[in-house]
Every structure is written in structure tokens, then in C-alpha cells.
Image: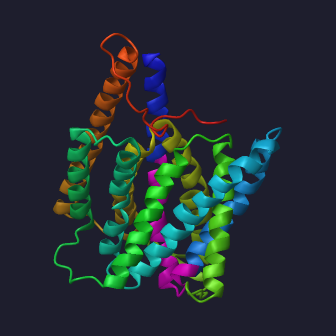
């Protein structure tokens, strides 16, 4: 039983780290497109819509004999796409248009705190002490990695858009970690499709600017067709990243997955170094170590809390035992193949 749980968490950790690495590749490729004149809205819409199309045949194949579950699970997947895809992307790009990218990304990653507070509100049980320490360490490390010191006071409107992105990010970890009868690829496909529809509507009403740029871009100092950058954003930074992220969240649970997701920043810095020649400074490297320490602290807190809950369940209903409200089923879920 213990060995099976270790494999369960191990697979989730691998999937989540691979997802973070895939998401981390989006920065250099998206930057090359925007430098060539493509608007952020156009880039993200093509990325999300393209990923939805790529996942469509795999999602349909995975639903063989399960079409009866789609009707009941559709609202959850569609809500995931609206909140975790459309709202997160729209909030982030709107925030970036009003403040430095580093500040906007830091505000978005406040979503990890929203996850912990959400679980706290539902269970009425304060996070474990180590989880609290992990929050502080992770955010401190993230601030160092992003190197946002010395920035001017951000726009209030930009902060509000950044908070919308944070809510969307929290929604990703919470909703992706919920038990569902839909296979991960089908869940991701429905979510991406819903997100693309919402983003397209936002573009039509003028909330999200949609502008096409040049047909060639510069990646790692080499000229390439724009479709190469879009292909990477669609296949790796979106389709693969979202599927692996959902699988990872189902294995790890929402709280731990949200903290492992912080490693996306480290991967993004590494890819920017390789592809753009942006070498991280000493402060950023130290921040990465602090951030990973926060992830470890959260993992230890989750383990201790799980042990305490198991002990309480074992003694509940026995002489001297006390029944307590059950913790919501966010923490560890088997993937639905």
C-alpha cells in the first residue's frame, strides 16, 4: 500500500515537472512572435485553439464507451476552461499591458495562496505549520527569481487584472485535481475548447486585441517561419503541458501541485538562458533554491497532515475517539485512463 502510494506520488511529480517544463518553453517562442508584431491576444488564442484541435481526436478516442459521462462532467470541464484557461490568460495579458511582466507574474502566482485558503475554508482546518513555512519560502524564492525589486508602484487596474489571473491559476490546480470520470486528455480538450471560445469572444468585443504580425520570427538568433513558433506553443507549451498538468494534479492533489507548479519559473529562466542568452543572475539562482525549499516544506506538511488524518480516522468511532469533518477529496486522485 505504501509502495503504491509512493509510485502514485512519484508519477504525479514527474508529470507535473514535465508540464512545468513544457509551459516554461512558451516565453521565448511567444516573445519571438510578439517581437515580430503579433499581439499577445492573437498569440494566446492561436495557442489555446490550436491545442484544442490537436487534442480533439485523442479526446474522442479516449471517450469510447464513456459518452454517457460527458453530460454530467461537461460543466466542470467547461468551467475549468473558462476560469483556468481563459480568465488566467486574459488576466495575465491585461496585467502585463499595465505593469512589468515580473510584477504581473508574481501577482498571478498568489494563486497558490488562494488554493491553501480555499482548502482551509472548506475544511475549517488551518494548514500545517510546514505548509505555512512553504508558502513564505516559495513566495520569497519566486520574488528573487523574478527579480522584481526596484519597480515603481504598479497600476491598481493592473493589480486587479493580475488578481483575476491568480484566481484562474488557483482554479487550474483545484479543478484539475477534482475527481472526474473524464480521461485527462478529454478533460483538457473540453477545457481548452471552452477557453478558446471565451478568448475569441473577448477578442470580438475588443477586450483582447487581436493583431497579426510578420510571417517570420527570430528564435535563438536564427530566422524561422512564424508557424514554427506557433507549432511549439500549440503542441508542447499548451496541449502537452495541460494534459500532463492535469495528470500531475490528479496524482498530487491541489495544494502540492500548486507549489510544484512554481518550478515553471525556474524552467522559464533556463529556457530563456538557452534560447535568448538571458543568463540568470546570482539572486535568481538563490531564489530558485529557496523556491524549491518551499516545495519540500509543503510536501513534508502534506505528509504529516495525511498521517494525522489517517490516525484520526483509525480512532474515530472507538472509545475515546472523536469524529471530525472529513477533508474534501482534493489531495490524491488516481488518473482516469
238 and 278: which is toward the camera = 238
Image quarter for residue 183?
Answer: top right
Q: Main secondary structure of the magenta part?
A: helix
Q: Residue at horizontal 33%, vertical 35%?
A: 302
| Residue 92 versus residue 125 in the image, above or below | below
Where residue 245 sits in the image (x, y, percent)? 52, 49
Point 25% across, 50% down: residue: 135
Q: How is the image coloured?
A: rainbow
Q: What span is in magenta?
A: 18-41
The quadrant the C terminus occupies is: top right
Q: Is residue 197 left or right of residue 229?
A: right
Q: Is residue 249 above or below residue 229?
A: above
Q: Is residue 200 left or right of residue 295?
A: right
Horizontal and vertical percent position of residue 175: 53, 51
Closer to the camera in the image, 229 or 237: 237
Residue farthest to the top, as pictured:
319
Regarding residue 277, the answer to whether it shows in the image is: no
Residue depicted at 38% across the width and 59% down the height: 111
- The residue lying furthest to the front in this view is 319
- The image position of residue 236, as x and y in percent, is 57, 57
Q: Is residue 95 above or below residue 314?
A: below
> Is residue 286 visible to the viewer in this orientation of the structure?
yes
Residue 17 pos. (x, y %) = 43, 46
- Compared across the picture, whether 43 is left or right of 219 comes to right
Q: 82 or 264, which is in the foreground?
A: 82
33 drawn magenta: yes
Among the 4 quarters of the image, the one containing residue 163? bottom left
Side of 182 relative to 210 (left or right): right
Amino acid at each position: 500500500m505504501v509502495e503504491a502510494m509512493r509510485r502514485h506520488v512519484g508519477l504525479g511529480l514527474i508529470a507535473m515537472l514535465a508540464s512545468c517544463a513544457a509551459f516554461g518553453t512558451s516565453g521565448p517562442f511567444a516573445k519571438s512572435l510578439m517581437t515580430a508584431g503579433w499581439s499577445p491576444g492573437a498569440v494566446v488564442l492561436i495557442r489555446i485553439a490550436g491545442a484544442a484541435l490537436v487534442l480533439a481526436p485523442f479526446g474522442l478516442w479516449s471517450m469510447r464507451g464513456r459518452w454517457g459521462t460527458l453530460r454530467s462532467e461537461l460543466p466542470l470541464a467547461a468551467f475549468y476552461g473558462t476560469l483556468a484557461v481563459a480568465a488566467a490568460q486574459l488576466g495575465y495579458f491585461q496585467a502585463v499591458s499595465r505593469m512589468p511582466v515580473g510584477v504581473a507574474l508574481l501577482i498571478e502566482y498568489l494563486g497558490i495562496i488562494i488554493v491553501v485558503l480555499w482548502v482551509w475554508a472548506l475544511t475549517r482546518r488551518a494548514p500545517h505549520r510546514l505548509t505555512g513555512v512553504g508558502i513564505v519560502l516559495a513566495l520569497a524564492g519566486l520574488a528573487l527569481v523574478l527579480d522584481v525589486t526596484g519597480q515603481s508602484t504598479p497600476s491598481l487596474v493592473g493589480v486587479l487584472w493580475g488578481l483575476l489571473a491568480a484566481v484562474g491559476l488557483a482554479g487550474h490546480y483545484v479543478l484539475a485535481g477534482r475527481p472526474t470520470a473524464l480521461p485527462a486528455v478529454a478533460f483538457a480538450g473540453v477545457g481548452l475548447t471552452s477557453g478558446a471560445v471565451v478568448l475569441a469572444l473577448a477578442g470580438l468585443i475588443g477586450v483582447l486585441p487581436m493583431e497579426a504580425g510578420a510571417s517570420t520570427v527570430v528564435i535563438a538568433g536564427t530566422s524561422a517561419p512564424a508557424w514554427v513558433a506557433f507549432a511549439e506553443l500549440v503542441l508542447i507549451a499548451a496541449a502537452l503541458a495541460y494534459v500532463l498538468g492535469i495528470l500531475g494534479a490528479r496524482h498530487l492533489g491541489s495544494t502540492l501541485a500548486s507549489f510544484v507548479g512554481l518550478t515553471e519559473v525556474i524552467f522559464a529562466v533556463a529556457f530563456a538562458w538557452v534560447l535568448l542568452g538571458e543568463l540568470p543572475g546570482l539572486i535568481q539562482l538563490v531564489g530558485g533554491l529557496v523556491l524549491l525549499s518551499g516545495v519540500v516544506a509543503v510536501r513534508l506538511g502534506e505528509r504529516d497532515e495525511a498521517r494525522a488524518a489517517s490516525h484520526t480516522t483509525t480512532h474515530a468511532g472507538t472509545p475515546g475517539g472523536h469524529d471530525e469533518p472529513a477533508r474534501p477529496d482534493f489531495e490524491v486522485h488516481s488518473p482516469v485512463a
